[in-house]
Amino acid sequence: MFMESSLAFTLPDFLADSAKRHPQKNFIEFENRALTYGEVDSISDRFAKFLQELNVGKGDRVAIKLANSPEFIVAWFASAKLGALTVPINYQYKEAETSQILNHCLPKVLLSHKDLLSSSIPAETTVVWLDEDSLKEKVRGGSRYNIENTLLPSDPLVIIYTSGTTGTPKGVVQSHRTYVLTGLSFPRWLGLTSEDRLLTCLPLSHINAQAYSTMGAIGADATLILQERFSLGSFWDQARDKGATEFNAVGAMLMLMYKHSTQSRRDHNVRIAYSAPSLPGEIRNEIERRFNLKVVFGYGLSESTFGFIEPVDGPRKDSSMGKIRSYPQFPNRAIIANDDDQELPVRTTGQILLQNAALMNGYYLDDKKTAQALRNGFLHTGDLAYMDSEGYFYFVDRNSEIVRSKGENISSSEIESLITSHLEVTECAVVGVPSELSDEDVVAFVVPRRGSTINEDDIKRWCKERLAPFKVPARVLFTDSLPKSATFRTNKQQLKREAIASLSV
């Protein structure tokens, strides 16, 4: 583990310290390849020199549109060594999504693969094709980059673009300090050591895979097992074969395991899984029983990697996000507040406000939204929750996803959780659409289990037996799948459009 002096590190310092202490230990394992800490530090030095020859310097943007791979991480670290801002773009993004990001951040260099890029490129952007072979060619015989600018922990490191499922994507600027602090903290929160092997199949374009898995591996002196993508059919075989002991997930992944993996699977070394959002207690308990591991739920977001987490060795509460998570020298304050930023009593729903050392620098080129989010000394998350008398927090909904029906505010996530708990349902998403009377009607999109004959009346009956009448969906629409962002978030804007079109027919 790192000494407290490492809190003043930048990302290049963080990597270099690990490479100095255990240069021969595997840092990244991917398919049939492995790179040690020493190799990643050395190769990223030489790739930084390559970028420097393309006139990349401090404050420039380097966009990366690649699938999960060692090349992605090497390019990211090389960019960081020059003080440039890495802009990760999910490799699954289509032309319009990619162009929107490129035209907003105007990168000096775009690193990608010919098969992944069809977008028009800004005139000032140099495109570099990058894969395993081309990386070797670009760093062969190369020298170390020249240090031209002093880096500070507060300097910007990345621009993470939000998924845009509730509006136009925003570029979240995060600092070196946030990433190093998260790397130090994540092992503490989960009890990880140098013996652990952290598996991630979440995209490296997302802050979870970057700050928790990659930085957490460095902070624990551990090994990162990188997978290109999540595949339910091969996940447990790969986890077993790679000797994974921990993995990060999102709720959709765990639900797929719960719904489709009916057989127990215990021929692996995984002992802990970190995931968000929290799932109902009976589902978590069944996943833990079936796969012989512990599931720890938490809460974080691109704007702050701190938030909440369940005590890894303490009491857990059903459907809770856990307690405030922090680092000893850097406390984290969280309150549930009303629209005037006044703290609310326990068990009263309000917006989550965070105040910690791992907050974003702001939104890239958007002073107005930055000021709105970072006001009165707090990050305004836009998420609704409540806290109980013992300091456990419970997610209610995104503020933007609350459905207003019959004069009541309705949590879409509450209805989704209930419907998904039906054994014949794989996934569910709830949206509000304009009502002929007033406010909105509740519409539920349901993905049934394969071969199921469940119908709209069945779903409504399930809800009527368990929910107040005003929460029962007015319509239930069945679909083979839900539209998802690259980070597995359901695109509710698209579903709203589909619901309105369906109801107007």
Image (cartoon, rainbow, N blue to C red):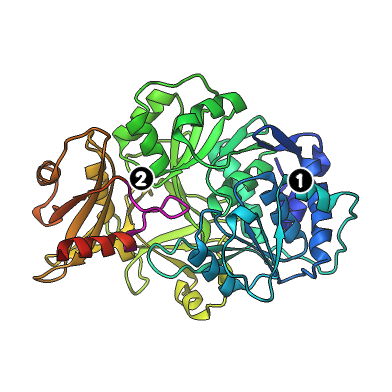
Question: Residue drawn at (27%, 59%), measured in percent from left and top?
Answer: 348
Instruction: Answer whether residue 133 is magenta in the image.
Output: no
The reply to whether callout 1 and callout 2 are in contact (CB within 8 Å) is: no
Asked which quadrant contains residue 153, the reply is bottom right
Mark nearer the viewer, 1 or 2: 1
> Does label 1 or label 2 sit earlier along the sequence?
1
* Identity, as a three-letter code, of the amino acid under mark 2: Ser
Q: Is residue 445 above or below residue 89?
A: above
Q: Which type of secondary structure does the marked residue at label 1 adopt?
A: helix
Q: Is residue 489 magenta?
A: yes
Task: Name the element at disc 2.
Answer: loop
| Residue under pointer 1 | 133
Q: Residue at x 29, y 59 (%)?
A: 495
Q: Is residue 235 left or right of residue 151?
A: left
Q: Amino acid at mark 1?
A: Asp
Q: For the residue carrying disc 1, how many other residues have a C-alpha within 10 Å: few (<14), some (14-19), or many (20+)?
A: few
